[in-house]
Amino acid sequence: MKPMFTVHVGEFLVGDFIRKKFGRKYETWLPTRDEGVDLLVTRRKGKCRPVKLQVKFSRGFNPSSVPPEELLGWGWYTLNPAKIRSSPADLWVFVTLTDQHKAHYIVIPTRELRRRIPKGTGKTWHIYMAALKGGFCLNTRSLTMEQKKVAYITRKIKRSLDFSEYFENWKLLDKASR
């Protein structure tokens, strides 16, 4: 018998996190069909619009380019720009599960993610997301080793590669539900 739906680990981690952190405020739902939304989040009280989440998961990696004492999490995501452009989701959530079984989340509005797709990107867009202590989070995919080292030290990077404002930013859930 074929299951009606399955939950992948990223969806489970996001749903469980929302339940534990915001359980009095939000309810999390699983759509029965895959139409570009992995989770639906509604407020428990009041009339607010539901928030549609698209979840991407990566196990954690320990790249040699990141100082180990600074690294919180590093994940590799393979995205389809056409799916991002047509996504009905309000927010995309990138989940990295570290070797120590700690999950880190980058919560970004779909609209902003669309803006960050590099011009000329074909059918595949690779993102290597590095999250460092102090809330610095960046896409290191297009950077040379020297550029990465400078970014890790200075905490400055080109805006299109800087995801710091979206690292663990669950306030966007409130904003999207209004």
Image (cartoon, rainbow, N blue to C red):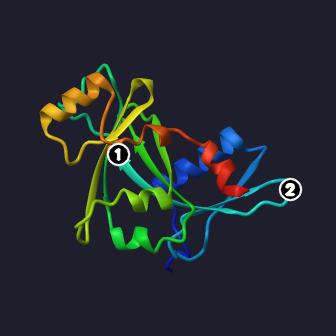
Point out residue 79 in the picture as x, y percentages from the top left corner.
Answer: 33, 63
The residue shown at (49%, 43%) is 166
Q: Which residue is mark 2?
A: 46
Q: CA distance from mark 2 to mark 1?
A: 36 Å
Circle 1 sits on which residue?
A: 59
Callout in the foreground (2, 1): 2
* Callout 1: SS: strand
Farthest residue toward the right?
A: 46
Identified at 18% across, 31% down, the residue is 65
Left or right, residue 49 beside residue 14: right
Does 135 sit above or below residue 168?
above
- List the single residue furthest toward the bottom: 1
In the image: residue 161, left or right of residue 35: left
Q: Which amino acid, mark 2?
A: Gly
Residue at image coords 40%, 59%: 115
Q: Secondary structure at mark 2?
A: loop
Q: Quadrant of residue 83?
A: bottom left
What's the mark number on residue 145?
A: none
For marks 2 and 1 on the same chain, the one whose residue lies earlier in the sequence = 2
Mark 2 residue crowding within 10 angstroms, few (<14) / some (14–19) / many (20+): few
Residue 124 position, x and y percent, is 25, 66
Using residue 39 as the reference point, say whether residue 75 is left or right of it. Answer: left
